[in-house]
Amino acid sequence: MSVMPHAQSAFTDNPLLADWTAAYGLPPFAAVTPDRFRPAFNEALRRHRAEIDAIAANPAQPTFDNTIAALERSGQALDRVVNLFFVLAGADTNEAIEAVEREISPLLARHSNGIYLNRPLYARLADLYKRQRALGLNAEQARVLERYHSRFVRAGAALDPQAQERLAAINERLASLGTQFGQNVLADEKAFVLLLEEGDLAGLPDFARDAARQAAEERGHTGQYAITLSRSSCETFLQFSARRDLREKVFQAWVKRGENGGATDNRALIAEMVALRAERSKLLGFDSFADYRLADQMAKTPAAARKLLDEVWVRARAKAAAERDALQALIAQEGGNFQLAPHDWRYYAEKRRKAEFDLDEAEIKPYLQLDNMIVAAFETARRLFGLTFTPVDVPLYHSDARAYEVKDANGRHVGLFIGDYFARASKHSGAWMTSLRDQEKLREVTPVILNICNFSKPAPGEPALLSFDDARTLFHEFGHALHGLLSNVTYPLLAGTAVASDFVELPSQLYEHWLEVPEILEKYARHYRTGAPMPKALLDKVLATRTFNQGFATVEYTACALVDLDLHGLPDADRLDVDEFERRDLARIAMPAEIVMRHRLPHFQHLFSGGGYAAAYYSYMWSEVLDADAFAAFEETGDPFNAATAQRLRDYIYSAGNLRDPADAYKAFRGRLPSVEPLLKKRGLAGALA
């Protein structure tokens, strides 16, 4: 395709659009400034539109190569700009980037509409789909064709023009609302800092004090201590602070993100988004957004997802009730005359763990150095899949980020892994995996995969120490990273994590199991001062407490998944009162008063900032059924690194992308579909019934 001279100049003058010649094909980060993005988006969108128009207008009879493969080869410049922009928008944002994000989100939605609602293009796809048996396609090509046809139909390609016009308007509005939602949450998180003096630190262990001192230093408050709303900071404070009044203040700030009134209040945005999703689903022939969303997932129906959640819920609530009673008794033993409140739970659970198991987090954390846990995750990948991770010195977007070249057992380059582990004001909260480049063999592309986390940053010269939950998060996100790094498919549409949302958590949640394999902890859980390994007695205690407080953790999560399904199961939501809905739905499921949803609706970014898990937050539990059963396959061999099992895992799960239907992929690995029993055993819920 020819390029007009002025467009060619735009490409060469803008570093975002010129060839990226840095090591490993990385962007020229030093030359990337926010003002470069809008012109880069404009030009990349123009080029992609021209490519799509050429495919749709091709006078030749549709073939796989001139239609499907052509679609797969198109949009390369746009992919690069989009991937880089959203890495920065999530991990190192600022007001200028946020302004571009607000502008570009509806434009990207409009561009997507222009593709999926392109009638001549859909006609070519539909023709190929009808003739697929006569096309001589291999299995991967047939899967790509099927996925494209499904995507177009689910996007409204077969609707009449009037319905398509309304659908396009809904999609653009939802994109804008989702961007605003996420920026509002980040604004509330940045706005809260609890500054403390030495006398306010009762109960906090040294590592928590050090992290709070460092957080204050970074904010210009030398000599003080700061608690922020990064999860590592606030949860640690809730776990250890003896100051009940301060625990309540931090907890309320945490749970009220997005509902503080004013410009950052998300409740009106939620009501509009839910109503628009319901309307869109009806246009596409579904009773509700939940019905629409799950029709293309492994669960297939909201009823199937709810059946699993209900089975877990009744057991989790019963176990949480027993945990609550034990904590209330502990309060009474200490002479307290108050009822256990949500901001008390973590504090008294930690006391109970210490009393019942002679174990507290402060005893564990010195053995969980971030650097060691990173190496432990790498070593697990080496033993399972033959991968090696070698640090490389390359320019990145932030000094906290670090890069590693990934090679296979034969020394061949697999990809680049970037880890960005510390919380900062320019980073959205949470932890996630993303990519600058996805694997594909169509153009022989190797992946560049990132893990973004929010662990507390240590003082200069001190090691970063993780809680056990932090270490589990690191392994979880690295499991996602491996799903991207090990991808071995031809077509971009099927690469890496581009699978059903209730299947995508299988590689990540499964990988968490290896953190608890004794030989991994014995080797890498070493005291940050002495280098001594975690004593066996302490290691045994850690492993013995795996199901401790799991009633609380399961209730905290499952309530979110149930509320999500109920909210997106509404046939319409034109008069939705978000506060009232949340209260009413929690009352319906008999949510314990002492526990709050892990993500309340006003800050539930999984559902409303991008919407990737809308009507699908159940996916974590669905995938946990898979991961518990999958790890049992290793346990049945007596070797957590069994080579034959690891090879099947690689072939059918980690490297296979979306080559197969999820159920078929799991059966190819395990020989059968999973049972729920390993999940109940893993969470200590097998015998827990009300």
Image: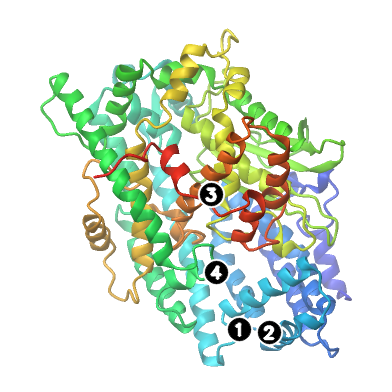
Q: Relative to 473, does residue 207 appear above or below in the rendering?
A: above
- Mark 4 or 2, closer to the camera: 4
> Which residue is located at x 67 percent, y 54 percent?
668
Q: Which residue is mark 2?
A: 122
Residue at disc 2, secondary structure: helix
Asked if the residue under mark 2 is in contact with the one under mark 1, i.e. CB atoms within 8 Å, the reply is yes
Does any portion of residue 426 appear in the rendered image? no
Three-letter code, disc 1: Ala
Asked if the residue under mark 2 is in contact with the one under mark 4, i.e. CB atoms within 8 Å, the reply is no
Three-letter code, disc 4: Asp
Q: Which residue is mark 1?
A: 157
Marks 4 and 2, Cα distance to the nearest angstrom? 19 Å
Q: Give coordinates of residue 179: x percent, y percent.
A: 50, 61
Three-letter code, disc 3: Leu
Q: Give coordinates of residue 662: x percent, y percent.
A: 61, 59
**Pointer 4 or 2: first along the chain:** 2
Q: Which residue is mark 3?
A: 626
> Which residue is located at x 62 percent, y 40 percent?
478
Residue at disc 1, secondary structure: loop
**Pointer 1 or 4: first along the chain:** 1
Numbered-mark total: 4
Badge 1, how many Cα within 10 Å: few under 14, some, many 20+? many
Marks 2 and 3, Cα distance to the nearest angstrom? 35 Å
